[in-house]
Amino acid sequence: MKKPTWVIEKERTKRAAAQETVWLFGLHAVRDALMNPNRTRLRLVVTKNAADKLQEAIDVSGMTPEITDPRKFSVPIDSGSVHQGAALEVKPLNWGSVMDVCQPGLENPHVVMLDRVTDPHNVGAILRSAEVFGARAVIAPHRHSAPETGALAKTASGALERQPYLRVKNLSVAMEQLRELDYVLFGFDGEAEETLDQALAQVKNRPVAIVMGAEGPGLREKTRETCDKLVKIPFSGDFGSLNVSNAAAVGLYATRYSKQE
């Protein structure tokens, strides 16, 4: 009996995921991945100088590095990447499901949701801010979002190893799952009437998800409709605009400390 198309596609996707690997580069990103017990590591390529700097992490990982000449540093990363003499091939991390990672528990957590933010440098910076301000997770759609890459990991400066980054099949479904967990969903929109601070003042005892769109297009219509409320970051003067990673940092700070007042 011939398998249905959807079954074939699901199996193909599963096989592709099993074969997927990522090359991390740079001393910080490689060191943190070597120290992460949840990271599946495959191959470590380093110069002698980098190996000396990473010796403690290499010992913890139990890996045997391949020592290479700096002039012959040959790994499949972009030629313009600043690798600092260290590259590590790994499997992408599996953090688990939205429902598992984002359970409120004894606290009222906050999460970041990204609607088609594809720039790995922006996502890396957001992961770094999310870790600093204690976000439970950063959630993005699997398609049309930044996957784990060396550039993302380097910008995240180690946060990729510690901050859950959940890439989901459907962002709106993930938003509804958070609503089932009693999260309130605030979508960022520069033309909204209410500010984030005003909105947060009304939900101090609720877990919060801040939902951010790509620069330019902003939130998609379906995402906007799924939000509980659209909010803005107030600005001075006649014009105000923040890079999405900077806006996320402001939103995370406001969300974190509004809960402590």
Image (tube, grey):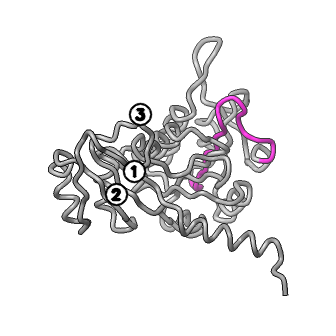
Seen at 59% across and 55% down, the residue is: 206
SS of the residue at dot 3?
loop
> Which element type, helix, strand or loop, lies under badge 1?
strand
Q: Position of residue 236 (x, y in %)?
A: 58, 16
Q: Which residues are magenta?
A: 205-222
> The N terminus lies in which quarter of the figure?
bottom right
Q: Amino acid at mark 1?
A: Leu
Tell whether position 214 is magenta. Answer: yes
x then y, percent, for residue 187: 68, 42
State the CA–CA distance, disc 3 to disc 2. Answer: 22 Å
Mark 3 burial class by Cα count in 10 Å: few <14, some 14-19, many 20+: few
Q: Which residue is mark 1?
A: 24
Disc 3: which residue? 80
Q: Against 228, is 11 above or below? A: below
> Relative to 150, does residue 254 appear above or below in the rendering?
above
* Number of the front mark, 1 or 3: 3
Q: Amino acid at mark 3?
A: Gly
Outermost residue on the bottom side: it is 1
Verify whether residue 239 appears in magenta: no
Q: From the viewer's perspective, tell me whether residue 58 is left or right of residue 96.
A: left
Residue 18 position, x and y percent, is: 55, 69
Q: Nearer the viewer, residue 122 or 40?
A: 40
In the figure, residue 56 lies in which quadrant?
bottom left
Instruction: Determine whether label 2 and label 1 are within 8 Å by CB.
Output: yes
Which residue position is annotated with label 2? Answer: 33
Q: At 81% across and 42% down in the image, what residue appears?
A: 221
Q: Amino acid at mark 2?
A: Ala
Where is 240 relative to 123, above or below? above
Q: Residue at x 32, y 52 (%)?
A: 30
Which numbered disc, 3 or 2, marks the residue that appears first in the sequence? 2
